[in-house]
Image (cartoon, grey):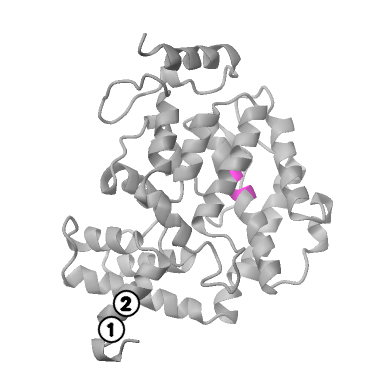
Amino acid sequence: MADRIRKRTEQREQEWLSPFAARSAESLGRPIPEPHDPVRTCFQRDRDRILHSKAFRRLKHKTQVFIDPQGDHYRTRMTHSLEVAQIARTIGRALCLNEDLIEAIALAHDVGHTPFGHAGESALDESLRALGHGGFRHYEQSLRVVDVIEPLNLSEEVRLGIGGHSKGEKDLSAEDGAITSTLEAAVVRISDRIAYMNHDVDDALRSGMISEVPDELAGLGSRHGERIEAMVMDVIQNSMDEPRIHMSEEMLGQLNWMKFWLFEEVYRRYPVLYPDIGKAQAMVKYLFDHFCTEGLPAGYSGVQGALDYVAGMTDRFAMETFRVLTIPSAFRL
């Protein structure tokens, strides 16, 4: 009787979801076995754990692209994650996939991101390589956050989705939508790129960094929502009743061209137009170097501890810590 509600939901999944969808009753389980929840499926429980985690709450004070923008409407890591979840759930619902698994992966996919966005990620990557380590990748850190730093004991399907979401600067290809862990993870992977490219264009227009969207993208629509809708509909139409998630060749080409254009006109130009990027990177490097050799809070130690501590900082906490460490107390305002 205690498990009646959860089992009813699991039964609905069996009856309604696509044969290619992940079903919570067939989950691969958790690293540490634990009793089932009487009401929530395992993926619903994972989503709730992520939503209530400290790592997720910190995303509201972490840069997406624009550092300390003069305006309230620029994206942060939290709003980015919410937009990914919304796009991915729309696709997942249309394809009869497991929306709870999709949402859990989407909400957690960036919890390992550094302060100051990609500037902070680049700074930690350079610092680690200088010490002879393998470098920093935010998706690996995201998995470390939910496994070790704030252990949430998530389902294996969610963990695999978190660890496999990122493409970096590489083009998307038809293979990216093939089953690597679950179709739900593939949906988040594509939705992440749809979300960040479109909202980064929107923020770049708001900042005045670009004045218009290039003619090459006119076929996607004249407004932010129209471009997202065009991409989402293309994914749905080309993935319906298929064992993989994919776009048409035409849309895939436009998406990859848009990515190339963003790197050329926004991401690489931003540090040149806004020198504070370099200052933010220097700040992150200083903090990492300091905590590699000086005292860390309880629970952190060594190079890995310094990495975990600095990567977990919000923008404002990083700035405050830097100020305390570098400015004599008598001079602080």
Residue 326 has which mark? 1
The residue labelled by disc 2 is 322
Name the residue located 32 percent from the left edge and 47 percent from the top edge: 144
Give the total of numbered labels. Answer: 2
Name the residue located 27 percent from the left edge and 79 percent from the top edge: 324
Q: Residues within 10 Å of mark 2 (few under 14, many from 20)?
A: some
Instruction: Find the magenta span and give its range.
Output: 190-194
Membership of 192 in magenta stretch? yes
Whether residue 19 is situated above or below residue 170 in the rendered picture: above
Residue 74, x across and y down, in percent? 60, 64
Q: Nearer the viewer, residue 179 or 100?
A: 100
Q: The disc labelled 2 sits on which kind of residue? A: Phe
Residue 9, x across and y down, in percent? 49, 17
Quadrant occupied by the C terminus: bottom left
Residue 227, x across and y down, in percent? 75, 50
Q: Are marks 1 and 2 in contact (CB under 8 Å)?
A: yes
Left or right position of 13 against 239: left
